[in-house]
Image (cartoon, grey):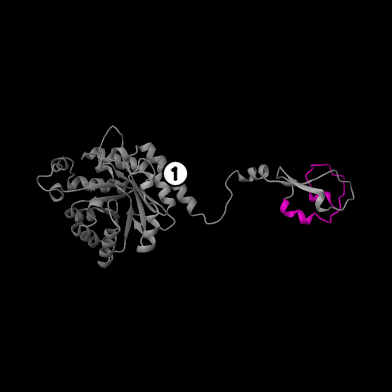
């Protein structure tokens, strides 16, 4: 699957950062988020975008707040173009379908169907019709709901989309998802059942959960970023600051790289450890020159710098060309 300029295979990782809604509609801060994400090793950045009147009923208490933080079309264009200039992908969680045409025109690399909209044809169908790759957020979803949206997407000819496993507990007062509630085993279940790429949305406070999810089979990972935890957006308590996020991404990439190695390879330093920890063939007692070696004349002791015990049969029947002291490591040069 291709997101922006990056083709993501089964052995690769696409790690993007979600702006933790802390920019609050401030273009300058939003641009700083994009700049920061380009510097910490992420593949892309995600913004939630909405036209509030299309998202809330008039009496909803959040309507006025969302009006205050709404980006104009020109500002959205600037955000997309700035991300492209810095060679990172721009992803948009589109909460208003009327934004889709302009986002596509501006070059948005992927859309995200929010967990609140996986049962909403008014968002799903236009995203499919846009032909832009998209991600389906599965926090809050039951298996029956996942079946429904996957069927709908395939029925309508969608091909380039990813299922994003995850949970979302913040609105209920819980401060992030606990590791034991992450359902990471469901990643492989979905891969097998739907024959689709699967990723993971991390709503935990853990810095290692992304790497664990990658090891569980997720090829796409997203995690929340905040420039400073003093800026308390709605998801601030599951956000990481830039230095934390940079370390998280770097560690996840190391784990991802390790998963591509399908053969046993010694780690740097293991050759030294091997000589220290393994055993060698040594003389069990003093042996005189000219002796024909028998199995009771040697034993196996550390260090492992001599002949490997696995070669012991090759010594039986050989004739010593010199005296050998007790506990002396045997070498092939000692034999005629």
Residue 279 as seen in the image, left or right of residue 8? right
**x then y, percent, for residue 29:** 25, 38
Residue at the spot 18% in from the left edge and 41% down from the top edge: 69
**x then y, percent, for residue 129:** 23, 62
The mark tally for this picture is 1
**x then y, percent, for residue 186:** 37, 55
96 or 191, nearer to the observer: 191
Instruction: Kindly state the secondary structure of the residue where label 1 is placed.
Output: helix
In the picture, residue 263 is in which quadrant?
bottom right
Query: Secondary structure of the magenta portion, mostly?
Result: loop
In the picture, residue 162 is in which quadrant?
bottom left
**Residue at the spot of label 1:** 251
What is the quadrant of the N terminus in the image?
bottom left
Residue 288 as seen in the image, left or right of residue 35? right
What range of the chain is rendered magenta?
309-336
Magenta span includes 329: yes
Residue projecting furthest to the top:
230
């Amino acid at each position: 699957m291709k997101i922006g300029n990056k083709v993501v295979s089964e052995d690769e990782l696409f790690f993007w950062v979600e702006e933790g809604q802390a920019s609050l509609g401030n273009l300058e801060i939003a641009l700083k988020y994009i700049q920061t994400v380009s510097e910490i090793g992420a593949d892309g950045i995600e913004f939630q975008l909405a036209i509030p009147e299309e998202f809330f009923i008039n009496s909803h208490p959040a309507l006025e707040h969302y009006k205050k933080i709404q980006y104009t079309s020109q500002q959205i264009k600037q955000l997309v173009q700035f991300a492209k200039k810095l060679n990172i992908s721009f992803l948009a969680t589109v909460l208003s379908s009327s934004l889709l045409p302009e986002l596509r025109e501006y070059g948005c690399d992927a859309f995200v169907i929010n967990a609140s909209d996986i049962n909403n044809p008014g968002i799903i169908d236009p995203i499919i019709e846009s032909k832009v790759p998209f991600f389906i957020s599965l926090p809050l979803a039951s298996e029956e709901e996942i079946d429904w949206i996957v069927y709908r997407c395939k029925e309508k000819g969608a091909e380039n989309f990813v299922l994003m496993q995850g949970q979302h507990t913040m609105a209920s007062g819980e401060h992030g998802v606990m590791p034991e509630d992450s359902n990471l085993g469901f990643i492989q279940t979905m891969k097998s059942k739907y024959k689709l790429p699967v990723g993971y949305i991390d709503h935990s406070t853990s810095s290692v959960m992304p790497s664990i999810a990658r090891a569980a089979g997720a090829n796409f990972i997203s995690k929340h970023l905040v420039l400073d935890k003093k800026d308390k957006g709605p998801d601030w308590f599951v956000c990481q600051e830039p230095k934390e996020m940079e370390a998280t991404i770097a560690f996840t990439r190391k784990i991802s790289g390790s998963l591509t190695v399908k053969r046993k390879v010694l780690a740097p330093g293991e050759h030294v450890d091997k000589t220290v920890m393994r055993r060698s063939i040594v003389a069990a007692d003093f042996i005189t020159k000219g002796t024909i070696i028998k199995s009771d004349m040697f034993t196996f002791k550390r260090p492992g710098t001599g002949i490997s015990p696995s070669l012991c049969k090759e010594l039986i029947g050989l004739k010593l060309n010199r005296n050998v002291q007790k506990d002396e490591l045997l070498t092939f040069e000692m034999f005629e």
